[in-house]
Each structure stands twice: as structure tokens, then as C-alpha cells.
Image (tube, rainbow, N blue to C red):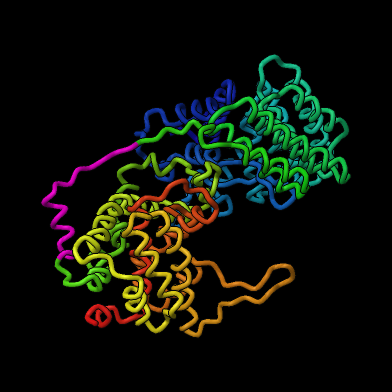
Amino acid sequence: MMSRDVQIESVASVIDQAAEASSMFEAVRALRTSLLSGTPSDVPVDEITDLPTKATLWAFEYKISVERDHNRQRAVVEPRFRGTSGETDPPEITAVAEEVVEVWHALTSKVSAPWGLARLRHLLFERRFGRVHEHAIAAAESYLAAAKNWEVGLDRAKFLGIGLRVARSVNAKGQADQIVNQLLDDARQELTEDDLRPGVFMRVMESILAERNPPGGVDDLLEDAFAKYADPFIRDSILRLQIARTSDGEVKKALWGKLVEVWNAAANNSQGLVRATHLKKALECAETSQERELVERAAANLQGLRKEDLGLATFTASTVIDDAEIERLLAPISGAGNWQHALVGLYQFYGPATGDLAQNRARVDQYAREFVLSGLLSKELLGGDGLPRYRPQSDEDRDAMALAEQESYNVQIFAPILAMALSRVADTYGIPSEGELAEFFAQAPLTDEDLAQALARSFIRYWVGDAEGAAFTIIPRIETIVRNLVVAMDRGVYRLQRDQKPGQYPGLGYMLDILKSHGMDESWHRCVLTVCANPAGGWNIRNEIAHGFVANLGMPVAAIVLQLAIYLWSLNGSPDTAADD
């Protein structure tokens, strides 16, 4: 058996050989291949009995990166893997066994390659082992030396950035200044290369600009980079760095204007959804600048888009239901006995058009399991005018959008059936007079004469063929009914005027949540929300109609909103008694 010193020398030789690779990735792979030769690939590192081998494998498995902490950057050493239960692989640097740290320390006297010394010295510094200050300085010097061994690229930029942060952490000014000078040289060299590698340049500049007092010449470098790199995303990053550096209000305003124009120019050179995305980015930049003139100009450009400019494709699908099945579905209406029972049956017989909430959630979960790739793609909802309305910002938002998509699908399938059912009421029992309908609706305690007559007129419009008129006039009444129900619960929801904002009731979604908290069926709550006012998807038809974004409303849409009106009206009425009367 080899002595410990011989083992250390052997492992150090492997580290030096691996350091000759052309990249950091290749170096680590070469190291692992050499150290694990003859060892089964499925053996966990912590079960390897050879201590020098295990200690070395762990040393090069830590992730070392530079992260921003408030307005400063710092080097962070983290385990490669962190489980949900708190387990890590390798162990947290503070929890590494002393015998492993001793191996790291022993290796520093045998390893000659700067790549290996940088890692080992850095880990000893983080572990607070021995002469901590000396380890930090040695790590910074090794990072600089190792970086010079590689061509200018991401590996080199990363090593210089980490070395700079280590040097600054112990106030090693000499080593830090050397690294900064090397970073400046690399940035200048990158701008003279024919090959465009903006990612390398930006990584280098981020390290330089993280300095408390960046060296002179960085502003000229940023200007030269803006001229060299035409990509709008890179120019966006450059301009944001320039904006962050200046305290002059006029200069900052000019830079914001330049940034907005970058995205406007990109939009002019693009088509379809890409053009719309660039114009949206221009508006986002203008809003961040808080410059009113920029905001108005960018908003006007985005509003100038038309749906036909987006190049969207329309897909249609149809399904066929035989006559016998249709008659089976309409039988509850035909056999209701009178038009009053038939109207009440629109919600009692068929339920919410969006379907059962529990079943919808189960389907969403099933689709997420079966179509994993689709769940990874980002989505953004467009309004009836073709402009962006909503983009999920979190997992919760994405779940809400997926649920609304499922509910909208159900509504599209069910709406034509409900339209036939509502028409069957008039076909079977005749169209009631406005007075008869108003008397029927007025029997609910919270439905006054004016509301009852308005409800009556909406249904008659539908039955005489004016489905669009029925939908336009019933949708505001839905909110009226909801507001009446909330007020009847003694919930103080009216908001007095604040500054220039007049007094008003809260939005429909807020009031629907109050009804749900007081026992409203959750499936019906989702139906009203998704059809009328769900920002995460669905029809959101109340807002789309109110702003004139819906060109035509047919009988299926009108039937859905009329069903919602009947259901909400019934929450404070006596529908069965009214129907009998």
C-alpha cells in the first residue's frame, strides 16, 4: 500500500495533467476520469475509501461563482447538489471533515498548476483553515495565472472575476489591481477581434464595473461596444450599464431615449410577433425611465399594431353531435313544464359552462405530466386588439393560466349547446312578454323594478335574434347583481375619493371572491370569473367588450352570459317558487 505522501504526490500529478486541458470543463472531466479509473461509476464519492481521491473529487465539484449581493459582488462557494431535505453533495464547505481539509492543504505544496492551486487555496480560505489571509492572496494570484493560461473567453473571464472578488475580500490591493488591469486588457482585445463574442465582453465588464471605483476608460469601452455589437439585447445591456453609472439627469434621460430607440429600430427590422415583442420592450423601457414623452411615443408605436400584422395562424376544429344526442341534451328544457322552470333550469340542469373545478384541476395536472415540454414554454396572452395583456410571473400564475385554458376549452364546447337550450325555451313555451319576465325577476328581494326590466329586455333581445344586443346589455347587469349581493352581506366595499381618484366600488373579481368566501359554489365562482374578468386567461369578455375589442358576438357567447345572470340572480331569489307561480 502506498504511503499518504506518495498518494498525495500521485493525485497532485493528476491535477497538473488535467490542467493542461483547453477548457475548465475538459479539465474537470480529465481529472475525474483519471481519479475514478478502476472504480465503478455508480459508487458515490462519499463512499470512496481512498481519502486523497475523495478529497480531490470533492474539491473540484464545488460550484464557485460571483453573485451580486445588494450593490456589491462576492464569490460564492456552494455544493454541486442540494436536495429538498437539506442534504448536499459534496458537504457544505463549513461541514467538511478536518481530514479532508488536511488533504487539500497537503496538495497545495505538491500541485504546480495554477488551475488546481486556485481551487485548493480558495477552499482553504472559505473553510477558514490556517493562515486564511495568505490562502486568499495565493488563490487570487493563482486565478490570475490560470486565466492567462487560457485564451480570452468565458472561462478566463470567470476566473478573473472570482480572483478579483477574493482579493477584494481581504483588501489585497496589489493582486486586485493586477486582475483589474488584465480585465481591461481583455475587454480591449475582445473589441478588436473579428469574431463577435459579446457574452465574453459583458462578463468582463460586469467584473470591472462591480468595483467601488471603476478605472478610467470604462465609459469609452462601453461606447465602443455599443458601436460594435448591433444586437438589440446586447445594446440593451450596455445602455443599462451606462445608465447605472451616470448621476446626471440629462445624460440619463438621453440614454433612456437611446434605449427605447434601440428596440424601436429592432421592431422596424422585424415582423409579426417578434416586432410586437420588440415594441413591447420599448414601452417597458420607457415606463421604467418615467419620462412621459418617451412613454407616450412608445405606447403609440405599440398601439399602431394591428392583428393582421402579427402573422398569427388560426386553427379551427369541429365536432358533430347527432340529432338524438342533441334532443337528449335539450330534453330538460322541453320537459320543464313552463318557461319559468326552463329559465331556472339553464343553470340547474346544465351547471357552470366551465365545468367542475375539481375535474378541471385534475385534467390540468394530467396534461402537465403528459406534456412536460409544453409546460416549460413561456406564454403571453393577447387581447382582442392583438396587444399583449398578461404574462405569468410565477409558478402560481402559470397554474392559474393553465386552469383558465382548460375552463375556456370547456366553455367553447358547451356554449353552442347552451345557446340551443335557451332558444328551445322560446320555441317550446313562446316568448314571454317584457312585463311577465320583469315580474318573474322582481320576485328576488335584491332585484328592483329597474333591474328586473333590464334583465327582461336582455332575454327578449336574445329570443328575437339580437344576440349581440343581449350580451352587451346583460354583462353590466351581472356586475350589478354581484354588487347587490355583496352589499346585502353588510360588507363595506365602497371606496371614498382619494386625491384625484373618485369614489368607486372594487372590481368584479374582488367582489366575486367575497361571494365565494360566503359560500358561493367554487365551480360557479370560477365560471363567472373566467368568462367575465379573469386576467390570467379565459374570455375576460366584460373588459374586452367594454373597450370595443370584440367585433361580433354570436348566440353562444350571449347564452353563456345570460346563464350567468340567471344563476347570480338566483342566489338571492326563490327560483323554484317563482317558477311555480
Q: Is residue 243 left or right of residue 232?
A: right
At 34% from the left edge and 70% from the top edge, which residue is drawn?
566
Q: Position of residue 149 (x, y in %)?
A: 67, 22
Q: Is residue 187 left or right of residue 373?
A: right
Q: Looking at the rendering, which quadrant does residue 159 occupy? A: top right
Front residue of 566 and 492:
566
Q: Look at the image and tell me whether residue 483 can be seen.
A: yes
Front residue of 218 and 561:
561
At 51% from the left edge and 43% from the top edge, which residue is drawn?
80
Q: Position of residue 441 (x, y in %)?
A: 35, 76
**In the depicted structure, whether residue 566 falls above or below residue 257:** below
**Residue 41 among those drawn in magenta:** no
At 59% from the left edge and 32% from the top edge, which residue is drawn?
275
**Residue 332 among those drawn in magenta:** yes
**In the depicted structure, whether residue 177 falls above or below residue 404:** above
Q: Quadrant of the C terminus?
A: bottom left
Q: Which residues are magenta?
A: 316-334
At 61% from the left edge and 39% from the top edge, which residue is drawn?
106
Q: Main secondary structure of the magenta part?
A: helix
Q: Position of residue 186 (x, y in %)?
A: 75, 24
Q: Quadrant of the N terminus?
A: top left
**In the depicted structure, whether residue 304 falls above or below residue 529:** above
Q: Position of residue 503 (x, y in %)?
A: 65, 73
Q: Look at the image and tell me whether residue 143 can be seen.
A: no
Q: Looking at the rendering, which quadrant does residue 181 occupy? A: top right
Q: Is residue 330 left or right of residue 72?
A: left
Q: Is residue 113 left or right of residue 459?
A: right
Q: How many marks?
A: 0
Q: Looking at the rendering, which quadrant does residue 580 occupy? A: bottom left
Question: Going by the picture, which residue comes out furthest to the left?
Answer: 324
